[in-house]
């Protein structure tokens, strides 16, 4: 079992910055992908950014150039630096971890609210 704990959400004005952190604990494999998803009000959950244990990153088009994902493998922690925030970035942000063993395993954090005011 894997437990994900997020921190860093909150209220920010448009144009501002926030940094999210997600610490993973438990049975974590050395090869995995950690990422951030978000769910705006009334919409489906969507990928924001992901990073493999080898450092390969993937971003949603809507956040490219504004958000940066990084990770510290020694601490099993993933970060999301969010700059130039827009009201449309308002959502609940969820940390995600995927890893493969006998089968694929996927875990979610509890979610953290980010509200960007105009």
Image (cartoon, rainbow, N blue to C red):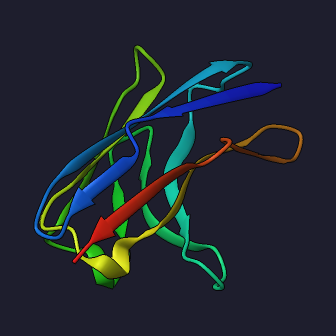
Mark count: 0
Quarter holding residue 97:
top right
Q: Position of residue 8 (x, y in %)?
A: 37, 37
Quadrant holding the N terminus: top right
Query: In the picture shown, does residue 116 fall above or below 78?
Result: below
Residue in the image at 22% along x and 74% along y = 64
In this view, 79 is above or below 38:
above
Residue 104: give x, y in percent of width and height: 81, 49
Residue visible at 54% across and 62% down?
Answer: 37
- Furthest-right residue in view? 102
In this rendering, the answer to whether 56 lies above or below 64 is above
Q: Is residue 106 left or right of residue 29?
A: right
Q: Would you identify the image quadrant in which residue 67 lies? A: bottom left
**Residue at x 66%, y 85% (from the top left corner):** 42
Q: Nearer the viewer, residue 78 or 14?
A: 14
Question: Is residue 39 depicted above or below 83 in this figure?
Answer: below
Query: Residue 74, percent across and down?
Result: 40, 14
Q: Relative to 16, is 36 on the left or the right?
A: right
User: What residue is rendered at 35% in x and 81% in y?
Assistant: 88
**Viewer-nearest residue: 40 or 72:** 40
Name the image quarter holding residue 100.
top right
Between 71 and 118, the residue placed more toward the observer is 118
- Report the side of 75 relative to 85 (left or right): right
Residue 84 placement (x, y as % from top left): 12, 67
- Which quadrant, please, contains the C terminus? bottom left
Camera-side residue: 49 or 82?
82
């Amino acid at each position: 079992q894997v437990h994900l704990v997020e921190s860093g959400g909150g209220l920010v004005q448009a144009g501002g910055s926030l940094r999210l952190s997600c610490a993973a604990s438990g049975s974590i494999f050395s090869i995995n992908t950690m990422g951030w998803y978000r769910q705006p009000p009334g919409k489906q959950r969507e990928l924001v950014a992901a990073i493999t244990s080898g450092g390969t990153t993937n971003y949603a088009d809507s956040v490219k150039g504004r958000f940066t994902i990084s990770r510290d493998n020694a601490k099993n922690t993933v970060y999301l630096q969010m700059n130039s925030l827009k009201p449309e970035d308002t959502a609940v942000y969820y940390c995600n971890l995927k890893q493969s063993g006998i089968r694929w395993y996927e875990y979610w954090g509890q979610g953290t609210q980010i509200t960007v005011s105009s």
